[in-house]
Amino acid sequence: MSVSLSKGNKVSLSKLASDIGVGLDNVAVGLGWDCRETEGANFDLDAWALLVSKKYGLKKKNLVYFSNKIDESKCVHHMGDNLTGAGDGDDETIEMKLSSLPEDIIHILVGVTIYRGGQRRQSFGDVTNTFIRLYDKRTGTELCRYDDKFSKEFSNCTTVLFTILSRNGSSWDFNVIGSGNKMASIADALNTFADYEYLLANVNKDNTNISGGKKKMAVSLSKGGKVSLAKVAADAGVAALDKITVGLGWDTNRYDGGADFDLDAAAFMLGGSGKVRNDADFIFYNNKKGPGIEHTGDNRTGEGEGDDEQIKVVLSQIPADVEKIDFTVTIDQADTRNQNFGMVENSFIRIVDDATGTELIRYDLGEDFSVETAIVVAELYRNNGEWKFNAIGSGFAGGLAALCRNFGVDV
């Protein structure tokens, strides 16, 4: 039987689990809500979990949500974004392996934020039938649950911190917080809840602290990860995303093979067929400009910190019949110099908002390549009227010529 909790209550999860014969290494936190009908945009609520390290405090890599779905320890996993909240049951789920978490993780804050709530004039005053529950994944057995019907006191709140899970020796406690906050984005949690100890100290007291603040962070993706540019921008406090810089970087080992490396970034503007419309859609060091896009120049050494090459994009100026922009890196004269991407390390691609200088997205490729001489690093693609980013990380043999043939460029 599930334990029904109220705001300010605390319960031992380890005791509850023991009573029903389950462990804490295969649990899930389900969150749900309904939204009252209002004029304007539909509500989009997003669940998140923030892990607190005793040694390092709050780290952006341990803020788990729709764009950073797994923490550093790989023990807390966001199961995906629900854009509507329609239907019964859990609207979003965060899975946790509590027993496997590193010992320095002492708290997990769990909350929900209204996407673009301030901009759309939406608040938890219009959200009802909210709940959070913790259950055993293997059996489906619910251990505890907290239900709330938010009232006018939350009419200025775009975020609610539902609970703080706290390590208690070898066990875990579930603390019901129910605290409303005014946050512009999920990233603000790193600042807004820096004083989480105050909230824990005030369990069993009415706590509807209203606060705010901005802390911008980049979304870190893994291979295959996809994310909406507009949503990431809004979450980072960028009001209107249009002009961006696509930065690419790498390090090379000049002693492998003897000769210097010369890596070249390029972009292919692709139509609905997945091919360029014409050869002018191949943007590289010898064809630097196209409609809404510009290559800033060739870096022949790759030395130094930061971006090695950059491609500027104005999203609003990309022709309507361009469905995708693929970004690539190739090794010049790879065959004659006996070079490949197995000799390249620390490769990355990042998206930066030009207006604010904010890094929005970053994809570090890792070292999964060996004989490849060309890589499709990532792409921007249209989806239902918006631009999304896809971390591809796909290697090619045959260098630039192979890429050109793949994308329909005459070579």
Image: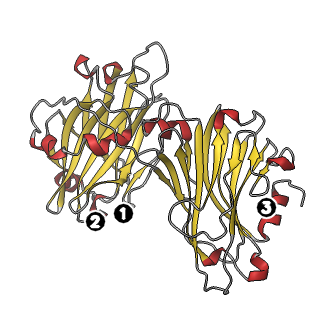
401 displayed left or right of 51? right
Q: Which residue occupies 69% across, 71% down?
A: 262
Q: What residue type is disc 2 on? A: Pro
**Residue 30, percent from left and from top:** 36, 41
259 displayed left or right of 84? right
Q: Earlier in the sequence, mark 2 or mark 1?
A: 1
Mark-to-mark CA distance, 2 and 1:
7 Å
Please give the residue where the numbered disc 3 appears in the rendered image: 403
The numbered dot on residue 308 is none
Q: Earlier in the sequence, mark 3 or mark 2?
A: 2
Callout 2 secondary element = loop
360 displayed left or right of 110? right
Q: What residue type is disc 1 on? A: Ser
Q: What residue type is disc 3 on? A: Leu
Q: Is residue 191 above or below residue 239?
A: below
Disc 3 and disc 2 in contact, CB within 8 angstroms: no
- Near mark 1 (Cα within 10 A), the count class, few <14, some 14-19 or many ≥20, is some
The numbered dot on residue 73 is 1
Q: Earlier in the sequence, mark 3 or mark 1?
A: 1
**Residue 270, percent from left and from top:** 77, 46
**Residue 102, percent from left and from top:** 28, 65
Mark-to-mark CA distance, 3 and 2:
43 Å
